[in-house]
Image (cartoon, rainbow, N blue to C red):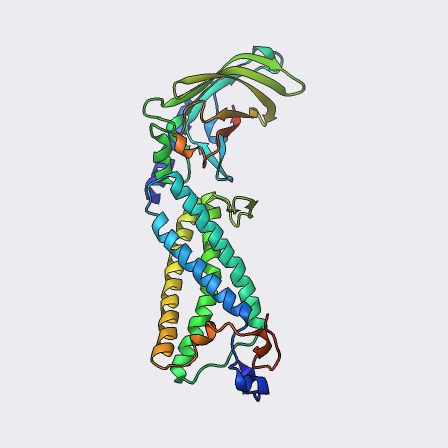
Amino acid sequence: MPDQALAPTAAQAVSMPGYTRTAITLHWLVTLLILANFTIGVNMVDLHISPLKLRLFNYHKWIGITVLGLVLIRSAWRLTHAVPPDEPMPNWQRIAAHITHAMLYALMLAVPFAGWLYSSAEGYPVVYLSLWRLPDLVPKNEALASVLVDVHVSLAWTLAFFVAVHIAGALKHHFFDRDATLRRMLQWRRSGLAMTPTGGSKER
Amino acid sequence: MNQHLRSFAALSALTIFVVAAAGDPSIDVAKSSIVATFTEENVPVMDAFKRFSGRIDYDAAHPAAAKANVVVATGSLDTGSKDYNTEVSKKEWLDSGTYPNATFVSTAITPGANGHFTATGTLSLKGRTQTLRVPVTVSRVGTATAFDGTLQISRKYFAIGSADWNGVVSDVVSVTFHILE
């Protein structure tokens, strides 16, 4: 963001500075996985004990670990690649949007991490894709598990809240302000036109 | 829910204490463990039986004369969750209503090299019996004697769990015991 003040290059004049393809791919991939996992998570807990329930718990854990890994990559990408400047908007909206983004990143890491902790405390190791056994983060502990499940679920609902705020903001910008906020997360630009505000071509 | 579990655990511990204090050389349940290990979709799960009793008569000078008799309360498998504890006690699993106990009674002891013996005996579980040969390691723990070993059983053989679980829960269940007396 501090780089936005730099003078636009010739290429930028014809093409809006946007998100890198990597950023766009990661955004929508993580979106899809979080929506799927939230749906599975909310529904699996009330099922009667059955093979399906056990399978869903495992799928839920695999998706969660995938999200954790992708969001770590995404965070690294976000920290090393400039994002397009904000569309013009009142300051409070800008601040709210940035707080929401920060909370989304924090929660996208915290929710699966708390889930992994909970699974360990319950005495069920996470075996990713039924192939790789991940380390137990804490030893089996029933009292700790009962706290961690509440932490995991509360954080997940907090994430859902910020996702709702994020979607509402994007739709508001698209339909009311008619600016490029949402469009630029959908714009799959040709790499030749890809210019970041720092002036470098970082498109992948 | 957890409070109930805690009171239940406290009550079981008290029962175990009273039982252990009553008899002559018998299993010190508080210091012993019997743990079932199996996998659920490749996820290893270890659940302990909380109630068991019995005795192992073992004289290091005459190991071949040893005798073992262990009774495990099938309804005491602790999965770490009340719902699953209720589930595994049901008819299609351990059916602890009809078969409250699983027993292992030795029929022959074959002494091996230092501190090892093989216990041949009959395991009765859920109305079925199977002859098992169980390798056991004996060691001294202070003034007590410890018996350690693992035996493996087939869930299907003992009709534990309905067929729709076969793709999820492993057939082989290992039972690891550490018995102190």
- A17 vs B93, nearest the viewer: A17
For this orientation, the residue located farthest to the right is B113
Q: Work out whether residue B33 can be spotted.
A: no
Task: Say if A158 sits above or below A198 in the image.
Answer: above
x, y percentage for residue A104?
Answer: 44, 67
Task: Say if B151 sits above or below A145 in the image.
Answer: above
- A39 vs B152, nearest the viewer: A39
Residue positioned 63% across, 13% down in the render: B61
x, y percentage for residue A44?
Answer: 36, 48
x, y percentage for residue A127?
Answer: 52, 45
x, y percentage for residue A117?
Answer: 48, 51
Residue A78 lies left or right of residue B160; in this view the side is right
Quarter of the image containing the N terminus of chain B?
top left
Give the image quarter of residue A164.
Answer: bottom left
Numbered circles on residues, count:
0
Residue positioned 57% across, 89% down in the render: A7
Give the image quarter of residue A107.
Answer: bottom left
Residue positioned 43% across, 48% down in the render: A145
- A192 vs A116, nearest the viewer: A192
Q: Work out whether residue B19 can be spotted.
A: yes
Task: Say if A165 sits above or below B38 in the image.
Answer: below
